Image (cartoon, rainbow, N blue to C red):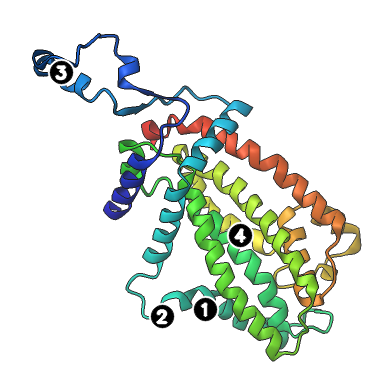
């Protein structure tokens, strides 16, 4: 935690002053003649540091102006987001004998367990696709989605000293977990490619559709993470309930089974969950080699476009009181 505080402090002092920042010289109304030596001796320490930037944290507000100002400030702190994301990865695999291999071991271990259960104990229709490839293609986006949420929700409360001692956009903490999870996703994607080659599942140009699908899934994960991480600061029940909710959620989306296993009369209701539609679309373009259903993709995209600004505005409106209640 001390190392993280030093990193954040270093970059926070290097950032340019955001629009709502005022200097002490603007706040102070005392005229000072800086030319004479006598006046230099009489200058108080607060006036001597008149050029030091002061961040004015405004009262909470839920508006478009909050989103606009927050995004401009976040852009100024992009270096800090990059540094904290690298910090997440280095700490996660620090003093680990296997290192980055753990990013692939989790989906591989789950793939082995589900393969034994759903090929030996019971059967799942996969449309002719070998079950290890089938389930891995569902686990890959799901682990990215769920690990982002589970880690980001608790991110703010893990660093109370960091939040109370310096200013930086608080959303950097949950977003850094998103970037770290995406890195693990890219590593595990290499394993998926190897499985497809081993089982002779053809690679098609439709796999390029996976890029916008993962982007929409990341936006959905970010909206949930921002909303519930802000709630977690006040209500710690959120962090306690989230692992349980994610476990239930996993079996309500087509990870270990296919969409065809859902009765046709319930599929419209089933696909109202953006996570279900996006994971099914990811498997469809990667494994089946066909274009995604554009209606499902457009619906999921519209949900994210509506939920992400609302979640971000709620997070920013809660930001000014986080240091008081954490």
Which residue is at 70% across, 84% downward?
196
In this view, the residue in front, 86 or 111, is 86
Q: Which quadrant of the structure image shows residue 44?
A: top left
The image's mark for residue 44 is 3
Kindly indicate whether the residue at mark 2 contacts the one at mark 1 (C-beta within 8 angstroms). Answer: yes
Q: Is residue 50 visible?
A: yes
The first of marks 1 and 2 along the sequence is 2
Labels 1 and 4: the sequence-earlier one: 1
Q: Nearer the viewer, mark 3 or mark 4?
A: 3
Alpha-carbon span between mark 3 and mark 4: 53 Å
- Which residue position is annotated with label 2? 98
Image point (83%, 55%), residue name: 296
* Label 4 crowd bin: few (<14), some (14–19), many (20+), radius 10 Å: many
The earlier-in-sequence mark between 2 and 4 is 2
Q: Earlier in the sequence, mark 3 or mark 4?
A: 3
Q: Whole-Å distance between the Cαs marked 3 and 2? A: 56 Å
Q: Which residue is mark 1?
A: 105
From the viewer's perspective, is 280 left or right of 19? right
């Amino acid at each position: 935690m001390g190392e993280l505080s030093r990193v954040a402090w270093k970059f926070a002092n290097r950032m340019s002053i955001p629009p709502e920042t005022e200097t002490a010289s603007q706040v102070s109304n005392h005229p000072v003649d800086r030319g004479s030596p006598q006046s230099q001796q009489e200058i108080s320490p607060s006036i001597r540091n008149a050029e030091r930037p002061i961040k004015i944290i405004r009262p909470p507000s839920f508006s478009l102006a909050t989103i606009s100002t927050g995004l401009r400030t976040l852009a100024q702190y992009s270096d800090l987001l990059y540094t904290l994301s690298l910090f997440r990865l280095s700490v996660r695999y620090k003093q680990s004998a296997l290192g980055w291999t753990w990013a692939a071991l989790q989906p591989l271990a789950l793939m082995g367990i589900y393969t034994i259960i759903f090929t030996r104990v019971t059967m799942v229709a996969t449309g002719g696709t070998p079950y290890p490839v089938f389930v891995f293609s569902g686990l890959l986006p799901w682990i990215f989605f769920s690990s982002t949420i589970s880690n980001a929700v608790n991110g703010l409360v893990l660093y109370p000293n960091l939040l109370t001692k310096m200013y930086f956009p608080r959303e950097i903490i949950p977003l850094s977990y998103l970037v770290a999870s995406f890195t693990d996703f890219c590593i595990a994607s290499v394993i998926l490619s190897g499985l497809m080659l081993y089982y002779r599942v053809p690679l098609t140009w439709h796999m390029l559709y996976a890029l916008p699908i993962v982007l929409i899934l990341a936006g959905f994960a970010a909206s949930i993470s921002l909303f519930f991480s802000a709630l977690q600061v006040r209500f710690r029940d959120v962090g306690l309930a989230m692992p349980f909710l994610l476990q239930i959620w996993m079996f309500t989306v087509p990870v270990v089974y296919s969409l065809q296993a859902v009765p046709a009369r319930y599929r419209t209701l089933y696909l109202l969950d953006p996570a279900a539609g996006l994971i099914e679309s990811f498997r469809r373009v990667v494994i089946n080699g066909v274009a995604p259903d554009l209606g499902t993709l457009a619906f999921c995209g519209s949900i994210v476009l509506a939920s992400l600004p609302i979640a971000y505005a709620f997070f920013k409106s809660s930001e000014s009181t986080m240091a008081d209640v954490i």
